[in-house]
Image (cartoon, grey):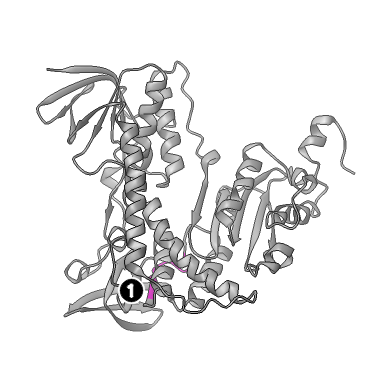
Amino acid sequence: MDERYDVCVIGAGTAGFAAAEAADADGLRVLLVSGPGALGGTCILRGCMPAKTLLSSTEALGDVERVRGVGVNVAGAHVDVPAIIERKRELVDYFTADRVANLARFELVRGCARFVARDTIAVGEQRISADRFIVATGSRVVPPAIPGLAEAGYLLSDDVLELIRIPPAVAVLGGGPVGCEFAQYFARLGARVTLLQDAPQLLRNEDRDVADAVAATLKADGVDVICGAHIEHCVRAGEHTSVTYTAGAASVTVRVGALLLAAAVLAGADRLAVDPYLRTTNPHVLAAGDVIGRRCLVHLAAYTGKLAVRNAFAERPQPADFDRFEMHAVYTQPQVAVAGLTESACRVRGLNVRVKHHPFHEVGKALVSNEAVGFVKMIADEGGRIVGVTVVGADAIDLIGEAVALINFGATVGDVAAMPHLHPALGEIFGRVAEDLGATANVISRSALLSGKSAE
């Protein structure tokens, strides 16, 4: 028997779940359709949560080295990889159970959906009609066209999450966030790691100073970082794989026990083209999350899922404000966290901005904690309004929350320079860099502008 709903959400990951919640809160009759695989979504099952669980273990290894610098000798520290994997499984089970319990309040149909009319889908033999559909089917990756790669075999990040035996030598193909994070993971667990990046720098979407800082810390962990590497071919022989690449004029072959493919890309055919309001060419269908082809990030997926539902029935739909949700991180040690625009993104947009760095080695708390590596970079427009902040260093991912708030509420460097910060604390660095940046121009704080006061 055919059913009709106000909203049918296709996909029960982060974007789909957020859309279903928003529709339910508006009193709409909502149906969720999810494929036959495990419920929970990429973040919970094989993305953010399990990956960061593993990385937290090797971060703890880095902390062992750090505390030696403050006079604490941790004798006999060793790594129990099966225990790391088991802890990850327990946490994934916990997060999955919570998500499944929350999904239970919605009508749910399992199976693959296909459109049979502009306002109707088929799931097996069942026909489902709705006033609006939200497509939130996520993303998949496809491997690059490297001769011999498929025959040689390779690991994806999903496979690393279950890897109990660490190979003695690993080649990581790709120097994006996943490649950098797992290169450090393998190196700290004792593997000899070669990281091959085709771009001139690691983290091709980050500013060069950030990429250089990450490269330095990976090299300190023993990772052989090769940028500008063009992989010629892969050959499997017994338990080993030979990877031949060129870098400049040289041709080099490395022999490893495993390849980690971290250079896969979002399949273009899977992307749904949407307008600024997340609408497709079908007036009944909107899309949200990874499938729209933006950054594959949980906070962005949740935002677009909710916005798609609001716009589905709004008389005056709102365009997606992607800049407001522009924040991301790299979970290496030291960490990288970015809020707002990067320096290179400002240049691409033709924005006239001012930029200042302040190093952590000039912050008291960083020195006493032996965490003095890294910096904060603040970017301000001509009027002094903060448009971007990058943190490279200890606790960067938690520190960036202050920067998100500053950008969200339109703070100027004058505001931040005048704002009190606890001492001693790593967060003092925001006031320091704002002072540095404000000193380059006669910048008026936002509060002074509102009160009609002039700059001193």
Residue 33, visible in the rendered structure: yes
Q: Which corner quadrant of the image does residue 8 belong to?
A: top left
Judge whether 60 appears above or below 2 on screen: below
Q: Tag 1: Cα neighbours inside 10 Å, few (<14), some, or many (≥20)?
A: many
Which segment did they paint magenta? 194-202
122 with respect to 363 (left or right):
left
Q: Which corner quadrant of the image does residue 343 belong to?
A: bottom right
Judge whether 403 appears above or below 112 on screen: below
Which residue is depicted at the point 48% across and 70% down? 61
**At which x and y percent is residue 435?**
78, 53
Q: Quadrant of the C terminus?
A: top right
Total marks in image: 1
Which residue is depicted at the point 36% across and 77% down? 191
Among all residues in the image, which is located at the extreme front? 75
**At which x and y percent is residue 66?**
58, 72
**At which x and y percent is residue 431?**
74, 52
**At which x and y percent is residue 225?**
44, 75
The answer to which of 258 and 108 lies nearer the viewer is 108
The answer to which of 68 and 124 lies nearer the viewer is 68
Q: Is residue 197 magenta?
A: yes
Residue 274, visible in the rendered structure: no
**Residue pointed to by mark 1:** 171
Q: Quadrant of the N terminus?
A: top left
The answer to which of 334 and 80 lies nearer the viewer is 80
Q: Is residue 420 magenta?
A: no
Judge whether 90 appears above or below 246 on screen: above
Which residue is depicted at the point 40% across and 72% down? 79
